[in-house]
Image: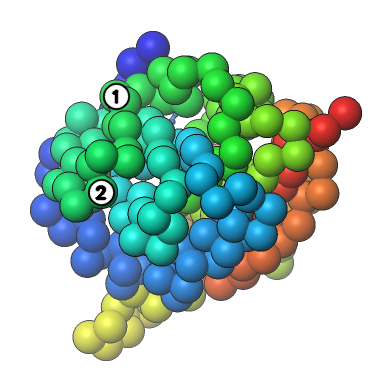
């Protein structure tokens, strides 16, 4: 099944996507490295990894560079973001299959691990649960999922989002602008509270849901496909 491209990921965002994401996400290179390490901890040397929301190819490139024996299947419903992923991962193309669509487009196969980075915050609760369930269905029991995205960390969510926006303003912080962007993010993104996020992972069939990354409004979890 081919999914619908979110308006945020039409062809207009692509030219600035890689540099913009590096600017916006605190410690992005380290987030990729932590993702790779959390998967690597319990994997055979040669592993197959499912990458959901693979557009741009940033995490694919980082993991392929670090792990020469891993193979990847990446899915993304945005043709332009997939095209960018193709270009960004050209050197590793013999180990990466990119598929146009949501997780349902990925072959049902027992992958050794999965990632879903900077993607779930765009999905309404029902679609998020469905996406997590479909990832779970494609993981071997005991395999790990690494997910990181904007969340509602508690307290004043607008303030946390504004801090994230301000972080991206490397040439001088404009709080008025950051607060305005935070307001539109808070009304436009279906953010979940941390406790709701954890409950959703469990509802989708994951256990041992543990936080490994927290930066302003971003949170990252490692979860294990229920071996039962
Ligand atoms: C902010 S980008 C993140 C891309 C990449 N994971 C990264 O970390 O740079 C979000 C991506 O999620 C994709 N996306 C939107 N809805 C999706 C869905 N239902 N399933 C999978 N990917 C989706 C978008 O097309 C976009 O490429």
Q: Which residue is mark 2?
A: 92
Disc 2 to disc 1, C-alpha distance: 18 Å
Sequence-wise, the earlier of marks 2 and 1 is 2
Residue 74 percent coordinates (x, y) = 38, 35
| Residue 156 vertical position relative to residue 170 in the rendered view, above or below | above
Query: In which quadrant is the N terminus drawn?
Result: top left
Left or right of 81 on screen, residue 173: right
Asked if residue 2 can be seen in this view, the reply is: yes
Q: Which residue is mark 1?
A: 100
Query: In which quadrant is the C terminus drawn?
Result: top right
Asked if residue 219 can be seen in this view, the reply is: no
The colour scheme used here is rainbow
Instruction: Using the rendered view, name the quadrant where residue 177 is placed.
Output: bottom left
| Residue 139 vertical position relative to residue 64 in the rendered view, above or below | above
Left or right of 201 on screen, residue 19: left
| Residue 79 vertical position relative to residue 66 in the rendered view, above or below | above
Residue farthest along the bottom direction in this orientation: 172
């Amino acid at each position: 099944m081919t999914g619908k491209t979110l308006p945020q990921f039409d062809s207009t965002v692509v030219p600035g996507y890689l540099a913009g994401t590096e600017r916006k996400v605190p410690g992005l290179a380290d987030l990729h490295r932590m993702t790779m390490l959390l998967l690597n901890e319990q994997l055979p040397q040669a592993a197959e990894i499912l990458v959901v929301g693979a557009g741009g190819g940033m995490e694919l490139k980082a993991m392929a560079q670090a792990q020469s024996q891993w193979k990847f299947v990446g899915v993304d419903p945005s043709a332009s973001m997939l095209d960018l992923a193709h270009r960004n991962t050209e050197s590793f193309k013999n180990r990466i299959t990119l598929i146009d669509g949501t997780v349902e487009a990925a072959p049902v196969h027992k992958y050794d691990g999965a990632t879903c980075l900077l993607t779930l915050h765009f999905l309404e609760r029902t679609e998020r649960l469905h996406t997590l369930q479909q990832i779970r269905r494609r993981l071997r029991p005991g395999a790990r999922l690494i997910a990181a995205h904007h969340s509602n960390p508690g307290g004043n969510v607008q303030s946390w989002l504004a801090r994230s926006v301000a972080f991206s303003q490397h040439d001088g912080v404009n709080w008025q602008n950051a607060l305005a962007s935070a307001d539109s993010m808070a009304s436009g993104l279906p953010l979940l509270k941390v406790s709701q996020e954890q409950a959703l992972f469990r509802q989708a069939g994951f256990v041992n849901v543990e936080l490994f990354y927290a930066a302003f409004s971003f949170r990252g979890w490692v979860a294990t496909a229920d071996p039962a």
